[in-house]
Image (cartoon, helix red, strand yellow):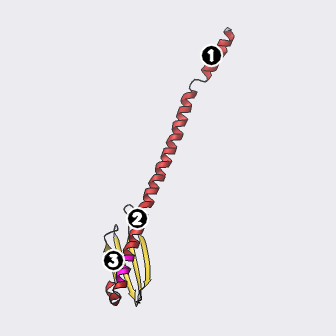
Amino acid sequence: MKKQNVLHTRLQRGQRGTTMVEVLVSVLLFSLGVVALLRTLGTAVQDTGALQYRATAATVADSLIGRMWVDRSNLGTYAGSNVAVPELPNGKRTVTVAGNVVNVDITWQAPGAATASNHHVTATIVGN
């Protein structure tokens, strides 16, 4: 009986600390998962901001083309470059008119972005 208790005690000593190692590995894996999730969330937020700016640029360009279509007789007055676009960060608008073909370029630079973004629309404005 004594021999069996000694063997049982030796087995218990060999397993001391294994629970702590298991807990540490679990915490490490959980931490890596949280970091990956936060990185994915950050990328999603950044992409959402870029999409918002692009949608705003499209709305500004389409609105201008709509005004030009209504005022077809004065297309030349809309031509100009580096006109401020207050809806976008560092937004600028360039309009060129050649006959009834209109090119609208909207550029902006998002906060923290290394390069500027661009939205280009070409429209042919004809009457009824």
Q: Are marks 2 and 3 in contact (CB under 8 Å)?
A: no
Which of the two labelled residues, at mark 2 and mark 3, occupies the earlier sequence position? Answer: 2
Q: From mark 2 to mark 1, how far is it between C-alphas?
A: 66 Å
Pointer 1: what residue? Answer: 9
Q: Are marks 3 and 1 in contact (CB under 8 Å)?
A: no
Q: Residue at x 34, y 71 (%)?
A: 91
Residue 105 % position (x, y): 40, 77
Which of the two labelled residues, at mark 3 and mark 1, occupies the earlier sequence position? Answer: 1
Q: Amino acid at mark 2?
A: Gln
Dominant SS in magenta = helix
Residue lying farthest top?
2
Please check the rendered image and state whether residue 64 is part of the magenta-colored stretch, yes or no: yes
Q: Can you say whether 94 is above or below 44 in the image?
A: below
Residue 61 % position (x, y): 38, 76
Q: Magenta stretch?
A: 62-68
**Viewer-side residue, 6 vs 122:** 122
Residue 42 % position (x, y): 44, 54
Q: Secondary structure at mark 1?
A: helix
Q: From mark 3 to mark 1, how far is it between C-alphas?
A: 83 Å
Q: Is residue 8 left or right of residue 117?
A: right
Q: Residue at x 32, y 88 (%)?
A: 74
| Mark number, residue 82 | 3
Residue 79 % position (x, y): 34, 84
Quarter holding residue 75: bottom left
Please check the rendered image and state whether residue 7 is part of the magenta-colored stretch, yes or no: no
Q: Residues within 10 Å of mark 3 (few under 14, many from 20)?
A: few
| Mark number, residue 52 | 2
Q: Amino acid at mark 3?
A: Asn
Q: Amino acid at mark 1?
A: Thr
